[in-house]
Image: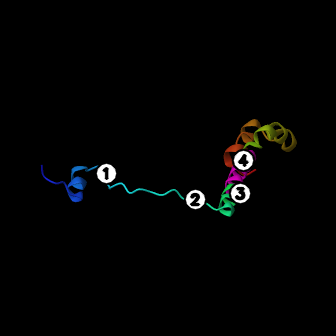
Amino acid sequence: MAEVTFEDREMETDAFIIRDEVPVKPVLLSQRQQRLARLQFFALCWSLAILGWNDGSTGPLLPRIQKVYNVSLRVNSLFPLTGCQ
């Protein structure tokens, strides 16, 4: 049986390239790095929650906006779509 080189395997698989597996050692983080990673993850979750809260805050206010500013339902329904609250 003939030996198959890396170049031959690459040519045989047109869709993707086969690479030899390299063992990877797990990365251990220090206590400070773990704390920082948790803080960054918490900040990410908090900012996404605040963004979602801000996007959803116009809906419940639509009847009040319609009453106070004397706008029709058609104009009032465009507020959430335009994003300029």
Q: Are marks 2 and 1 in contact (CB under 8 Å)?
A: no
The one nearer the camera, 18 or 48, is 18
Alpha carbon distance from label 3 to label 2:
18 Å
Q: Earlier in the sequence, mark 4 or mark 3?
A: 3
Q: Earlier in the sequence, mark 4 or mark 1?
A: 1
In this view, 61 is above or below 41: above
Residue beneath disc 3: 39
Residue 35, horizontal then vertical, whole percent: 70, 58
**Mark closer to the chain start, 3 or 1:** 1
Tag 1 residue: 16
- Mark 2: which amino acid? Leu
Q: Which residues are magenta?
A: 40-54
Q: Circle 2 — which element?
A: loop
Q: Amino acid at mark 3?
A: Leu
Mark 2 and mark 4: Cα distance apart in space: 30 Å
Task: Mark 3 and mark 2 in contact? Answer it, CB < 8 Å.
Answer: no
